[in-house]
Image: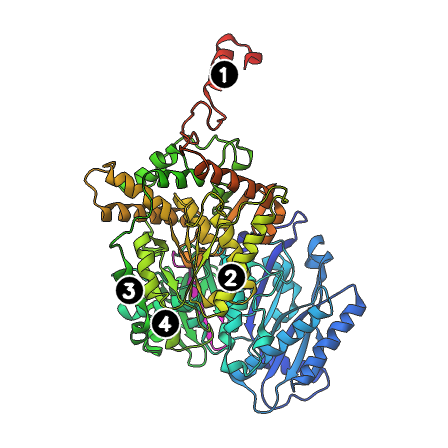
Amino acid sequence: LKALSAIWHRGAVDADGKSGDGAGILIGLPRAFFEAQVRDAGHEPRPGPIAVGMIFLPRVDLGAQEQARTIVEREVMAAGFWLYGWRQVPHRAEVLGERAAATRPEIEQIMLAAPEGLEGEDLERALYLLRRRIEARATAAGLQHFYICSLSARSVIYKGMMLAEALGDFYPDLTDPRVEANVALFHQRYSTNTFPEWRLAQPFRMLAHNGEINTLRGNANWMRSHEIRMTADAFKGDESTVKPVIQPGGSDSAALDNVFEVLVRAGRPAPMVKALLIPEAPIEGVISDDHRALYAYCNSVMEPWDGPAAICATDGRWVVAGKDRNGLRPLRVAETVDGLLICGSEAGMTGVPDERIARRLHIGGGRMIAVDLEAGQLFDETQTIDRLAAKHPYREWLSNMVELEPLVGPGEEPRKLEGEALTRFQAAVGWTQEDIESLLDPMAGDGKEAVGSMGDDAPPAVLSAQTRPFAHYFRQAFAQVTNPPIDSLREAGAMSLRTRFKNLGNILAQDETQTQVFVLDSPVLTTGMYERMLDVVGAGATTVIDCTFPAPAEGERQGDALRAALDRIRDEAVAAARGNAGLIVLTDERAGEDRPLIPMILATAAVHGRLIDAGLRTFCSLVVRSAEAIDAHAFAVLVGCGATAVNAWLAQETFLERLESRRYPGLSLRDACLNHRAAVEAGLMKILAKKGISVISAYRGACEFEALGLSRALVAEFFPGMTSRISGVGLAGIEQTSVTKAARGFSTDRARLRIGGAHRIRAGEETHAWDAEMIHRLQDATTRGDYKRF
């Protein structure tokens, strides 16, 4: 409590001066204290553990309050527990501010005796399943303001929307001399992603988290997919009870706690769960081979939860404290001579004098320390990972993991288009001469993204008089508020573009089958790599889906042809996944005069979303062959919408023809392909870094963009969860643009590319805010001192 009061400045305070974003403490269950409470309730404690539930009930709706108690008691009895009774938790409402007092719930504890012979982890698992059944019943009954803070025989949580220093005053239990605990996790909240609520105060059931989960949308989507195959012997047929794993209405920290809890209750210890969810970066030459094997296993099981984070967590036996892979949130650790471990965001929180400190421990980026409460033993950051790495033969298991780079890496590159046929396709996707010279040439020639200056003064795509790439309707999200971006150059070692292929297994299993995947260094494929991959990853199990559509007939309602094509593509993808296709390829290479291209971003999002809804996304990989993709932004949007890998086949056809015409002197075909791939990869790293994301597997499917000029209905259907503050083009407009571009490329006697003017001002091309006339008027007005001339 003293340490919590010392970090009051890390939380937010309401205008009333007494309401906070939330503060709380999780403590080991004080048995002597609750034995006394059981006796006060008129019962003699039974042999075995006492379980206590800390519950927020509706306060002003007495009918709902009674309904909630009824639901709890019925499920408790059905699960075989003995009910000692309810206890109104003493509290002092006068220490609260107006806002906290107005939203204060009824706070009660339920005290239970476990069924005979049920104890330890089996008891905690039974209580977890009991809580999930209660929550499901309460949700089905439409109960509002009902929340179970904790239900455990090992810990109990006291929390609320008070200031940090007021927690002990509000809950007199915490200052009762009988309340003794072997562990205390405390937290002062600064709300960045959700509004303050009593239930969102931390700690949650297992952890306290300081930071942001930047990949939350992607993690939540992938967890929905993982749930389909999620089984565990520990749950013995109760898998449906724990789904959905991530409960709606929570914060990013609450979602992380939901996943942490289900992994623990399925049988993994807290240190292993931390390694799975927030792994260390396996930097070559920095960590041992055994540790690298452990993290390779973790990355093959599930996507990391990425973003700046420091967490402290406990499963009742283990207590862990760890950081994100970049170490962007502080943790100060000290061990005292009398065996107390102190860990928190600030040094000196408890005021323990230096002479009492035995040693101070270091926690590196992605690492953790752990305490075994049963053995009374502390493991430092190296010992903790050593124990995990020795648990299973991970290095042996990795023999199941196939590295694709040596098998499909750069080699022979086929050519499909040249001359006029190539120009027609370039015109049909809307490319300009400027796109090729300013964007593509630096990438293929120098291995670098194009460098621009002075910002972008062209209008947004939705307001432009020119046809713009579909990727231009998306703006990348970036790290803000308390969330730092990453330096993708200096911290490249902590970042990764490594990409998994093949269907993903049961995340609750703990065996070598989870390493039976293919791994590629990045999601960027050359055309040759794509073709070689078909023989390795997709051997006998590949489905290729055409992403073009028949030109609409005269008089047909606009948008219907595109809608029908998207429905066809989604249906074909679902049928392929159900038919055991491990690799689904979306391609627009069959476009022609009567078959305009569907924007591949739209097609990818449509298929990815439908596969998630059908519970099939983890059964297959999604490779996108896109003619539109020319720069790193287009690749990022495709991956962010769910693509496993991307082949920019038209970009490659283009720079290979320019290579043959000696536009890149001194370069070989291999050099040009490697340069283009390296440029895209560097661009992807930069985009991830701006959002504070280190690993592309956590970015995939996260839709970390803002739609600018797409209709809200279209965004809601194909890009759910994406922000769209400026509505605009829908399926009808997209269809019309695709038909117009196809006609420009395939229906003219001689196709020509527009000069283009997105980056340089050119007559008859894109308009710019700061064109020559604007500058002239400004200069003339200032020279003459006449604002009206401007």
Secondary element at image label 1 = helix
In percent of width and height, residue 180 lies at 55, 75
Task: Give the residue displayed 18% in from the left and 40% down from the top.
Answer: 666
| Marks 2 and 1 in Cβ contact (< 8 Å) | no
Q: Nearer the viewer, residue 151 or 432?
A: 432
Secondary element at image label 3 = loop
Note whether residue 45 is visible.
Answer: yes
- Amino acid beneath label 3: Ile
| Label 3 vs label 4, nearer the camera | 4
In percent of width and height, residue 197 lies at 65, 58
Relative to residue 429, is residue 211 depicted above or below?
below
Q: Which residue is mark 1?
A: 778
Q: Earlier in the sequence, mark 2 or mark 3?
A: 3
Task: Give the residue displayed 43% in from the left and 29% down from the top.
Answer: 757
Residue 264 part of the magenta-drawn span: no
Q: Is residue 76 left or right of residue 126?
A: right
Q: Nearer the viewer, residue 214 or 639?
A: 639
In whole angstroms, how far apart are the C-alphas of marks 1 and 3? Answer: 60 Å
Q: Which residue is mark 3?
A: 287
Image quarter of residue 88: bottom right
| Label 1 vs label 4, nearer the camera | 4
CA neighbours of label 2 inside 10 A, class few (<14), some (14 to 19), many (20+): some
Note whether residue 190 is visible.
Answer: no
* Magenta span: 314-326
In whole angstroms, how far apart are the C-alphas of marks 2 and 1? Answer: 57 Å
Q: Earlier in the sequence, mark 1 or mark 3?
A: 3
Which image quarter is the C terminus in? top right
